[in-house]
Amino acid sequence: MNLVKTMRGKMLVSIAVVGIASAIYFAFLVMSIDAAEQPKTFRTHSGTVIQTTGDILDPIGYSGKPLEFIPDKYLREFSYGRVSKLPDGITLREFTIIAEDDKMMEISPGVFFNVWAYNETVPGPTIRASEGDLVRVKFINNGQMPHTIHFHGIHKSEMDGVFEPVGQGGGQFTYEFIAGPVGVHPYHCHVMPLEEHISRGLYGVYIVDPKDGRPPANEMVMVLNGFDTDFDMENNFYAANTIPFYYQHHPIQINPNELIRVYVVNMLEFDQINNLHLHGNLFDYYPTGTNRLPFTYTDVITFSQGERGIMEFNYTYPGKYLFHAHKTEFAEKGWTGLFLVKEPPENIDQYGVK
Amino acid sequence: MEEIKKTSKAKLVASGITPIIILAGMIVYIFGPGADLLDFGTPLPEITIETISFSDSKIIATVRNTGPIDVEIVQADVNDRIQPAAVEPDKHLAKFETAKVVIPFEWNEAQPYEIGLTVSDGTRFAKPVIAAASSPEPSFELASYFAVIGTYVGIIPVMIGLLWFPFIAKMSKNKYKFFLALTAGLLLFLGIDAIEEGLEISTTSLAGAFNGQLLVATIVVISFLGLYYSSEKLVNRYATSTMAKPVVVALMISIGIGLHNLGEGLAIGAAIGLGAIALSKFLIVGFTIHNTTEGLAIAAPMARTKPMIGKLAAMGMIAGTPAIFGAWIGGFIYSPFTAVVFLSIGAGAIFQVVITIINWIRQDGEKTLSNAAVASGIAVGMLVMYLTSILV
């Protein structure tokens, strides 16, 4: 009888202990107890300095590893292909583009997204030729589904990359066409579902230079793009050249009174429009880059999907100048950058600034 | 003789443990290292933003990993616009671990916001706030403020209710039964109300991983059984000796009501703590009116004894003061989990009180509840509560 009683008592006590312990565990914050660390500081977008002993969530740094895709490198990297002369005097430019769709890319600090890529980067390589060159692109599909390359420009129907899906697991196709017209054009995959094949990253820029070239300038490529990382048909991240806020933290350095030429291509999916606003300046704008005379002199241009053009400008005054989507939602989700106009050498002498 | 007893005991233990060992072996075989029998599907990350509070130029969210895998919080946003933020203690969350995300932000009073957090695979989780309001900082002033509110909601109404004592003491047996049944009805309503509240919080704020509804059910039953068991014990031990049985019954009722008031205090403290000022005013008025009837419930069993003012007042305190503790817990360390747990404990406690009262009625000569006074008492009690809940 006594034994039964003590057993019952013990059971009650143990139930109570388990109950109370689990309640305390869940009710109060279950935090891993770390040794007190030196507080870190960070600056908000409005300039306030904040201190924390925890981790900082800010799209500045990437998780320790060097980023596979470096927007600064992409900005000025032009691929002219393997050049040779054909017997009839025409310049042949040969390119190889390989599609993959199993790549995980850190598209924003700590955010790993399965991108589909041409030559392992989003956007793919910037292909550049002169008007009249013969462009030959050897396409290899190492993906797990069919892909193609559809070049904007003038070419034969069978070179359009629409009706000849290239099979997965090593399928090949060679696209061949005469470079033209002069301007800046996109290329992208044209396999259904189209929106997904494009928004996942299968796109790039194709520039056709005039035969006599353009005036010398500091040239760069900006692809306006975004990523829908949670597949709700809305972009979570926006950027010029893939990485949100990249050029805000790594300003593009230019010199005063230097001609800047930007090839801008809007590859943004899901949103109806995208736009670009330049601070402290206006620019000549050449839609599609096809006309030698500027279409307008402005500081905001608006793009629909696939729209593109060439901007030309120069800065007089040194300092930092923003460029960003004037659709400010996109700006606040990453499509924001900076030009840093360097101090001219004579000023450095004058003020003794190094 | 001893030897035989020992071996039979060992056999008993062995037979009890064997199935557990076999089960453990099977689980290791299926889920253990190297086992790929059930290796299909992709586990998806899931986090739950449990609370959002607003302070001077800051928005603070507490987040819990409620999914099957470890996650990393990599980005914070306000209204779907990316904001730099700090996550403490760190951005890596093991299963069920929580962290505090501090977003420096110039927010505006009474404006709606949505706070979002993105994990490393790019999935965004968000929680809306209907109207931003400054969360009170823990301070002595606020603690005393909560104590005052708790007194208004808990202690004073119960004391007012106790003033019915002489009124009940003088009435006829049938009317007395009616009043006992009335309190049972009132409390039954409060218990159901607490369960409903607990279920609502578990559906709106508690992560699915907690099995909120079952949590409510489990805790209600455990709380009920725990109080039922200890109250029977207490009644059996003391009823014959120093204290009269009615006093013990009244004491158990006041303990049950006290636990219930802890839940009420929690709701009020949480509402103030989360800045829902209008809601908390509503709660305060509602609970004050409701709780006056609780005094009646305590007074009723003792109505047939000679008046013991001191004991009655002590019981009023036992029933009322937990509201103050509840307000402190709710206001300073609120989490949906605590709220659900305390509401469920309160509901279980209230049901135990209802059973105690009904037993009390039956011991008073009534074998069934088919007595008109009893049936109408319970019904009127429920109706009164329902109507006050609409009107308040």
Image (cartoon, coloured by chain):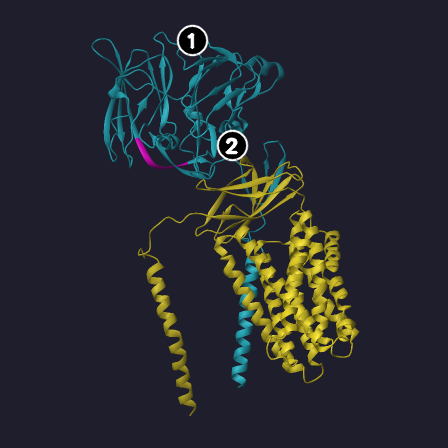
Write down the residue under mark 1. Answer: A215
**Which of the 4 image quarters holds residue B197?**
bottom right
Q: Position of residue B30 (x, y in %)?
A: 33, 60
Q: Chain of mark 1?
A: A
The amino acid type found where label 1 is placed reads Pro
Count of marks overlaid on the render? 2
**Residue B122, relative to residue B304: is it above or below?**
above
In the rendered image, the quadrant that contains the N terminus of chain B is bottom left
- Which residue is most to the left? A87
Residue A192 visible in this rendered orientation of the protein: yes
> Mark 1 vs mark 2: same chain?
yes
Q: Is residue B23 above or below residue A242?
A: below
Residue at image position (59%, 34%) is A44
How many angstroms separate mark 1 from mark 2 (CA)? Answer: 35 Å
> SS for tag 1?
loop
| Whole-percent x, y for residue A160 in the image | 28, 21
Q: Which chain is cyan?
A: A
Query: Which residue does the numbered mark 2 point to in the structure image?
Result: A333
Callout 1 touching callout 2 (CB < 8 Å)? no
Q: Which mark is residue A297?
A: none
Q: Is residue A299 above or below residue B324?
A: above
Res B249 → quadrant: bottom right
In the image, B5 versus A291, the foreground residue is A291
Give the crowd class for mark 1: few <14, some 14-19, many >=20 residues within 10 Å. Answer: few
Image check: B388 left or right of B339? Answer: right
The magenta span reads: A99-105
Q: Chain of mark 2?
A: A
**Chain coloured yellow in this rendering:** B
